[in-house]
Image (cartoon, helix red, strand yellow):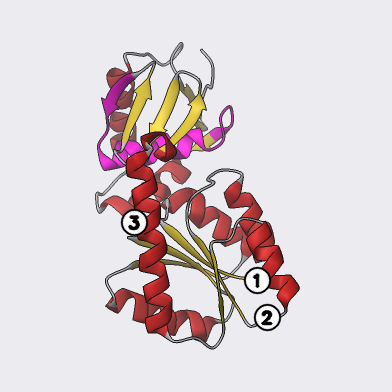
Amino acid sequence: MKILLIEDDYNLALGLKYSLKDEGFEVVYANTLSSGKENYLRENPDLILLDITLPDGNGYDFCEFVREKDKNIPIIFLTAMEQEESVVKGFGLGADDYVTKPFRVSELTARIRAHYKRYESLKKSNPQMSQIEANPDFKIDQTRLCIWKKGERIDLTPTEYKIVRKLTENPGEIVSRDALLECCWDTTGEYLDVNTLSVHIKRIREKLGENDKEGHIRTVRGEGYVFASSK
């Protein structure tokens, strides 16, 4: 289970990160709103722990950002604010829980497991929850690491999935080769260079039954690749 922790208090975040790792969780850390958004899009977390006060914005903004993309991923606010209006606002924006600092890690861990269990049950009962629609005929399945193209399932390797996910985050926009290499580096353990990336792109196209000029994934010479949302 992967947790995205967004907290600007470094000492608190460091201690919490180690405690959660001891409980068997994988933790991705961000200390700003902007880095939190980047990590959310890149890392595909299973649950979010979110502070309200951040250097470049607030947790409410991040909560809205996530809920526009995913209505169900568990979001737990971690904050020193105890005012009733803060709690109400957080829940109104789609938060699942609210923990006031200081808190016991054992209590937080119990809440994390409870919310994640509910989330997993929802995904099992409604498989479409885990699908991201890049266009009506092209869906990305986050649970199975595959693509659904016109109803046909196309299985991907972990590296191929990361590449496709990165390209479809911003359809029509050029994604540099460096950005694609970076999104794959920490998550797969596989060494990638530009040539290896080209091989992966070629394999993805072959699986899709497409080519460079008319397919969903197109090469922009000297710059990178772009996902064409419509062919």
Mark 2 packing: few (<14 Cα in 10 Å), some, or many (20+)? some
Q: Earlier in the sequence, mark 3 or mark 2?
A: 2
Amino acid type at image mark 3: Asp
Asked if residue 23 can be seen in this view, the reply is: yes
Q: Earlier in the sequence, mark 3 or mark 1?
A: 1
Q: Quadrant of residue 205?
A: top left
Mark 3 packing: few (<14 Cα in 10 Å), some, or many (20+)? few
Residue at (54% x, 46% y) in the render: 71
> Which residue in the protein does label 3 denote?
186
Residue numbers of the magenta segment: 152-174
Q: In the displayed structure, would residue 11 be above or below residue 113?
A: below
> Which residue in the protein does label 1 denote?
52
Please tell me whether mark 3 or mark 1 is closer to you in this view. 1
Q: Quick check: marks 2 and 1 in contact, CB under 8 Å?
A: yes
Residue at (45% x, 20% y) in the render: 216
| Image position of 167 (left or right of 20) | right
Task: Give the structural element (helix, strand or loop) at label 3.
Answer: helix
Q: Find residue 221 and report its horizontal and vertical position in percent.
A: 50, 25
- Viewer-closest of 114 and 9: 114
How far apart are the two marked residues, 2 and 1, measured between alpha carbons? 8 Å
Q: How many dots with numbers?
A: 3
> Which residue in the protein does label 2 denote?
81
Amino acid type at image mark 2: Met
Is 157 included in the stretch rendered in magenta?
A: yes
